[in-house]
Amino acid sequence: MTENFTIYSNLESTQISISSKYIPVTTTTETYSNSIRSIFNMIDEKEALEILKTYIDKDSVNRISNFVDLRGLASTVLWLSNTFPINISSISIAEDVESSQPLFVEIRIDNCDWEKWKYLAKYTKDTLNREGLGDIAGKVVLVCNQAMQVS
Amino acid sequence: MQPSNASELKPHKLLNYFESLLSNSLDDVFIRRIISAVYFSLFNYWSIKNICKGNKGKGNNNDSFPHTQFIQDLASSGLDPQIYLLYVYRVAVDHYTLNPTEVRLTSHPYKGRTQNVKIDENILRKILESAKDVLSFLDNY
């Protein structure tokens, strides 16, 4: 038995099926959006990859999965999309140009200015840290495209 | 040599000085060197804060800390806009020659995303504002 969830991106809505064994009986859609941890507990790695493939270039999947937990990343992406009226345009990995070491995973967001960016980042990282997902908080950076545009 | 406290590398005075230079028609060389200095003054301050907390880095004196940890510490606290702006422009001013230009934050051959940058006094002002936010965090780190 499965339940369907709609994941909205700026490109199109994507439907994924999550086995009902991950879904608490009393949970509602609203509850999912309030907790990154509840989404994290609900999905496995395969489902995480399904969620992320809308945003990640296939050439960088391995590098991202070697750096950050895909379930944590996918949960954060799903929670962001359900919690805020934003469009996530892409996800990529940034590396240190001198050492080539992975630095952070960029979650690129459309339609937000500098102040909204500051609020989104603080609220998201506070939530991740509070819910015991501090590793994701440090390895993921939200980037607002419009706020970084040069004049 | 052990530092007595983090005040030895406090960049507050340096940042105030750079702020006082705004609106003085700074040329590209000045702006580039200021942005690089701002970034590394924050990194040095973060490093000495770690030493004062008893954290050990690499090297004979355990005083060399990884760049990645600095960025991840700031990102973890929600300073994403500030550290992203500082990092992208630090890479731009130290590694790229043209202005404006496109910075690619990858060293690998696959097509990574690029970020358009324009090095001017407007961005310097924003970088100094961001540095102040980072400084507030590091003061209590």
Image (cartoon, coloured by chain):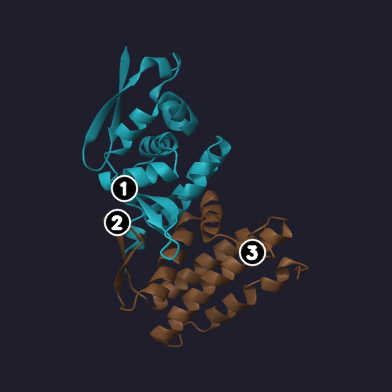
* Circle 2 residue: B112
Q: Nearer the viewer, residue A68 or B136?
A: A68
Q: Residue drawn 31% across and 16% down? A: A2
What label does residue B59 carry, if any? 3
Q: Colour of chain B?
A: brown
Q: Residue furthest top?
A: A1
Badge 3 element:
loop
Q: Residue drawn 72% across and 70% down? A: B7
The answer to whether mark 1 and mark 2 are in CB contact below 8 A is yes
Is B139 displayed left or right of B105 in the figure?
right
Is B59 displayed left or right of B97 in the figure?
right
Chain letter for the residue marked with disc 2 in the picture:
B
Badge 1 element:
helix
Q: Up-down: is A102 above or below A81?
A: below
Q: Up-down: is B56 above or below B17?
A: above
Q: Disc 2 vs disc 3: which is toward the camera? A: 3
Q: Up-down: is B80 above or below B41?
A: above
Identify the mark nearer the N-term, 2 or 3: 3
What label does residue A60 carry, if any? 1
Q: Position of residue A81 (x, y in %)?
A: 35, 38
Gap in angstroms between the C-alphas marked 2 and 3: 33 Å
Gap in angstroms between the C-alphas marked 3 and 1: 33 Å
Going by the numbered disc 2, the residue's amino acid type is Gly
